[in-house]
Amino acid sequence: MKEKYIHILGIAIVALGLGFVVFLYWSQPKTLAEVATKSQVVLGTYEINRDEFTRGLALFRSEDFIGARAAFDRADPEKRDANTQFYTAYSYYRQGWGRLSKDDTLFKPGLEAVDRVMILDPNFRSTDETLTMKTPSELKYELEEGLKLTPDDFNPMKLTRERK
Amino acid sequence: MRTASQEIIDVEIDEAESDLGPVRDVAIEKVQRPKTENQKPQLIYQLLPCLFILVTLLGGMRLGAADNAFIFLKPALICLVFASVLMILFFRSSLLKMDGWFSDRFSTLQNIANTAVLLTMFTASTQLFNSLLPEKGLPFWIVGFCFFWTLWNNLFADFDTKKLLRSLGALFGLAFAVKYLVLANLTATGDTSLLQRIFDNPAKEAFTWLLDLPRYSAGTGYIQFFAVAIYLIALFLTPSTTKK
């Protein structure tokens, strides 16, 4: 091989190798599978697992929210898909909703998920006709209201409210 | 089947051909010279960066005690200082010759390629200190001080390449033994409850708490052993000059 090409190859090896090391130390993957998904994110080829998403949606509609969230996590391990994160947030809302009280331990991660949706896609609007709330701002309002304790919470008329 | 007489004839032919020795030797030399000349650049610009990058990758890598998950630890600032001192030592002991790696007689491309190789050597050295220094607590300061003391003394000592390599081998070997044999054996591991661990092995739990030792999987020691070994091999393979 001509020496000039050996030098160019050497520079390329160093640039790629050190780039890969910096990427690993920056992204902190925990397993080899995570290395692959994080690489996809960096390269812009990341896609959610459609089969897991469909499974999660079916579980969400059958009110198995814990199972649905597990499937959504498998479908979108990097939490970069607005639609999947919206369903995750919605599952926290529906599971934590109660006529008398709301479950703060479920509403808090729900709020985090809906914040992720707003960062990923500020103009997100769900196309699912079965959902009452279509936008993250509506969902966020409900989750925030659920976390607050106000005199309005003791209004007996609130017992007639329905889950959205 | 070849008979004995045929073999004798073959030997005679070989001897007759060997009379043409000088002509053939020149021919062979002409064929072989480019191959051997090409091996050195390939060693410097391909093999050495690969080895040093591998050490850079492995040096900060640990495995979690509970689930063997990867943990990538960024090097402390002191590791960069130690690596810089080590690079100065390499040049002082003629392991690397300045005019053999950077020269106006080289092409710009070669100077850039040489800089890239030395950059990987620096990052590997940094990560090696990251590997051998305990992560935190009292052991970090004690081992760090020992490293500093040794490097500082070496900086003013008369060294040749062999002596430096032997000294570094001993230094890194001892640091490896302290961290991954002595301190690792003092660290309580396992994902049982604190109370259970205290009952099982109170001394280990006390040392872990007193010395603020992090808990890693046993596999970490194996990874770091290979990181140290690869680094020393790469240093051994590094030529003092890139001149032909």
Image: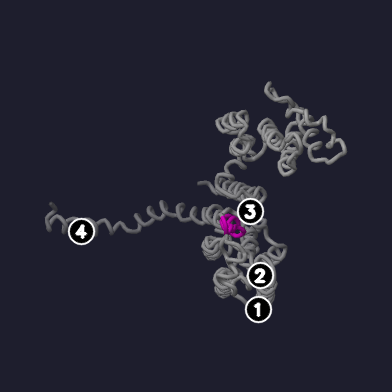
Tell me, yes or no, whether the two marked residues, 2 and 4, touch with CB atoms within 8 Å: no
Span colored in magenta = B53-66
Q: Alpha-carbon distance for marks 3 and 2?
A: 42 Å
Instruction: Name the subunit of mark 1.
Output: B
- Residue B180 in percent (x, y) is at 56, 68
Q: Which mark is residue B128?
A: none
Q: Do the dots labelled 1 and 2 sit on one chain? A: yes
Q: Nearer the viewer, mark 1 or mark 2?
A: 2
Relative to the observer, which residue lies in front, A73 or B193?
B193
Q: Nearer the viewer, mark 3 or mark 2?
A: 2
At label 4, the amino acid type is Val
- The image quadrant that residue B9 belongs to is bottom left
Residue A21 left/right relative to B35? right
Q: Alpha-carbon distance for marks 1 and 2?
A: 39 Å
In the picture, the quarter occupied by the C terminus of chain B is bottom right
Q: Alpha-carbon distance for marks 3 and 1?
A: 29 Å
Residue furthest right in the image: A151
Instruction: Name the subunit of mark 3.
Output: B
Of helix, strand and loop, which one carries label 1? loop
Query: Circle 4 is placed at which residue position?
Result: B11
- Residue A76 in percent (x, y) is at 62, 37
At label 1, the amino acid type is Ala
Query: Circle 3 is placed at which residue position?
Result: B116
Q: Nearer the viewer, mark 2 or mark 4?
A: 2
Q: Alpha-carbon distance for marks 4 and 3?
A: 53 Å
Q: Earlier in the sequence, mark 3 or mark 1?
A: 3
Of helix, strand and loop, which one carries label 4? helix
Query: Circle 1 is placed at which residue position?
Result: B157
- Work out whether residue B115 can be spotted: yes
Disc 2 residue crowd, few under 14, some 14–19, many 20+, Cα 10 Å: few
